[in-house]
Image (spheres, rainbow, N blue to C red):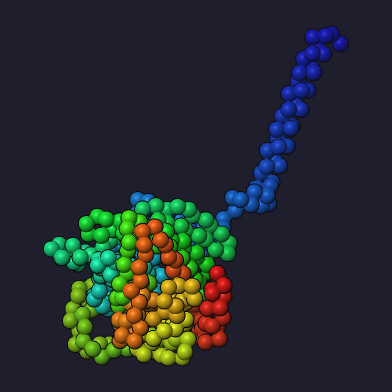
Amino acid sequence: MSYTKYTANRGRGLMLSIAILCFSLFFTVQTRGQNGGSKANKQKRIVLVSNESERKVDVMIEGKLFTSYIYPTNIKKPVLYPLTTPKGTKITRKFPLEPSVGERVDHPHHVGLWFNYGDVNGYDFWNNSDAIPADKRDGYGTIYHRAINSMENGDDEAKLSVTMEWVSAKGDVLLIENTTFIFRGRDNEYNIDRITKLTAKNGDVSLKDNKEGVLGIRLIRALEHPSDKPDIFTDANGIATKVAVLNNDGVNGKYTNAEGIQGDDCWGKRSNWVNLSGTVGNEIINLAIVDHPQNVGAPTYWHTRGYGLFAVNPLGQSALSNGKDVLNFGLKKGESTTFRHRIIIANEDLGKKQMDARFNEFSKL
């Protein structure tokens, strides 16, 4: 064989070897991906989806919407909205964000699940909404979303960390809020931990004893307590209409606290937890809020109203105890305090034994 032919044959052999090696490497990578070798890219059970143009982060559990962290410009604080059961039923009132039928149109500041307070250095953050006349806005404060710090998906839980600012009508930043939401959900129970750190930014901050606070949820009509008082509701066309005699068909909510007190009597009582039970159609729904023993004012007072406001307020002790207790809480410049709450949404009945166990579990965090 001539040297020229030898060289050509050797070159063709080398090229064939390289081609085989490349094919082998490609096949190996593809096989690993298909067999789960690249586990980092595998879809998690609980996924956070940020949508900056719509000013929200959706929380998806196994492909279904659980809730969204929203910060639109037409409400005065970021909120979680809607809250959805494991079976997909939305349990938060639609008004004022969406057209609705058969809902009360009171308290337009009651939106989804929120956290704020009625007296922060004299400014009312709780009652603020677009319904406040322009000439009265100087007495109100607004909470602004400032940043999404981190998002972490997971099979057991997902975490969303955000920063907000509590701003007075004068434009002063009174509090920096750093909040972590932890979302979990399996089978018949979803839950949310809201861990809220408040820091006095530019000076001392007073959170004077006030009935309006701090963590609240506004619920659909079915989970209210039955009532015979006239009120204003949206009609079949979504128009606010005075209703003299209420239709209580399907309205069956009932509060129960850790001491076994029920109904409207839960208002103004201290307790480690309160559970609101009811049904929507044939669907059993339990919605519970769990306090944490390290929170200021624990065990907390409860601001539970039969018309659908479900709130926990550790700071408004005089207002909720008829003067028996008083707490005028404050932070010096640079000081911080942290509030921890767990919200449970279940498609099953949660009795005292189950709720006490959930309180004990949460207390360890």
Q: Is residue 130 visible?
A: yes
Residue, far right: 1
Q: Is residue 224 visible?
A: no
Residue drawn at x 67%, y 42% is: 29
3 lies left or right of 166 = right
Residue drawn at x 52%, y 56% is: 152
Residue drawn at x 19%, y 87% is: 244
Residue 289 position, x and y percent, is: 44, 77
Residue, far left: 135
**How many labels, in total?**
0
Residue 321 position, x and y percent, is: 33, 85
Q: Nearer the viewer, residue 12 or 263?
A: 263
Q: Nearer the viewer, residue 184 or 120?
A: 120
The quadrant of the picture occupied by the N terminus is top right
Residue drawn at x 26%, y 78% is: 104
Asked if 208 appears above or below 269 in the picture, the reply is above
79 lies left or right of 119 = right
Residue 144 position, x and y percent, is: 32, 57
Asked if 47 appears above or below 89 in the picture, the reply is above
Could you say which quadrant of the image residue 337 lies in?
Answer: bottom left
Asked if 265 appears above or below 316 in the picture, the reply is below
The quadrant of the picture occupied by the C terminus is bottom right
Residue 191 position, x and y percent, is: 49, 71
